[in-house]
Amino acid sequence: MVKIFLLILSSLFLSACSLKKPTPLKLPPSPPPKTIVGGDQDEHGCIASAGYLWCGPQQKCLRPWEDECLHEINQIQLQFSDAKFDPPYSSIFPWNQETGNQLNLDGFTLYLSNPPKELAKRIETQLKHDGFTVSPKNVSDQVVGLQNQNTVCLIQEGIMWTEDQTENNGETPYFSLTCGYLPN
């Protein structure tokens, strides 16, 4: 009887060892997410995967290796290199809207004392050629305001009074160009 019992026990033991563990269920790999080529437009419509970035000053998408994104001030500086402008500096300037409201805008200013003759007129002509129009609410005796979409510029020229009375009786002609952007 003991032999039968040992035989049954060893059979159970051997059969238990030969049981296979369940094989985990293998699912097919999930497909990669569908990417639409050119579907990565930013809020301005620029397609980053094609190398386009938004250029606020020029209000268009550009590829940096093809075109420079220059502020209007930098473009004027390059186009009128005969004028020895002081380096551009940041400024806040007033802009009168058609509604009669006045905004204080952030911008950049080019300044030049003793400007070449007709510099203001030449720059105004160039800006008009570039699509700017005169903003009647921003014109006075010494100021001309111009606008192209949301880019605005003020051209000022006049006489600056200085304490140095030895040259020009203390009168120094000046020119300044300040440009910035209207809020969207």
Image (cartoon, rainbow, N blue to C red):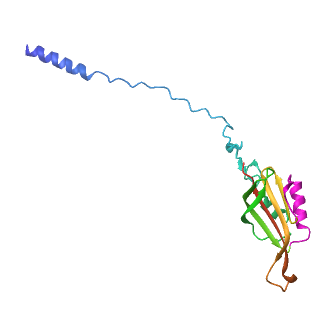
Q: Is residue 131 magenta?
A: yes
Kindly give the residue lying farthest to the left in the view shown: 1
Considering depth in this image, is 37 or 167 the residue closer to the camera? 167
Considering depth in this image, is 32 or 101 the residue closer to the camera? 101
Give the residue displayed 47% in from the left and 25% down from the top: 27
* Image vertical order of residue 82 relative to residue 147, above or below: below
Spot occupied by residue 163 in the image (x, y as percentages of width and height): 79, 82
Kindly give the residue lying farthest to the bottom in the view shown: 166
Give the residue displayed 81% in from the left and 67% down from the top: 176
Query: Along the horizontal axis of the image, is 173 left or right of 46?
Result: right
* Image vertical order of residue 6 relative to residue 108, above or below: above
- How many labels sit on residues? 0
Residue 147 visible, this angle: yes
Residue 81 visible, this angle: no
Magenta segment range?
A: 115-140
Kindly give the residue lying farthest to the front in the view shown: 100
Give the residue displayed 17% in from the left and 19% down from the top: 10
Q: Is residue 109 magenta?
A: no
Quadrant housing the N terminus: top left
Spot occupied by residue 144 in the image (x, y as percentages of width and height): 86, 61
Spot occupied by residue 72 in the image (x, y as percentages of width and height): 79, 58
Considering depth in this image, is 66 or 138 the residue closer to the camera? 138
When asked about the image quadrant of residue 89, the answer is bottom right
Give the residue displayed 65% in from the left and 34% down from the top: 36
Considering depth in this image, is 55 or 164 the residue closer to the camera? 164
Query: Along the horizontal axis of the image, is 35 left or right of 108?
Result: left
Spot occupied by residue 183 in the image (x, y as percentages of width and height): 72, 51
When asked about the image quadrant of residue 147, the answer is bottom right
* Image vertical order of residue 3 relative to residue 53, above or below: above
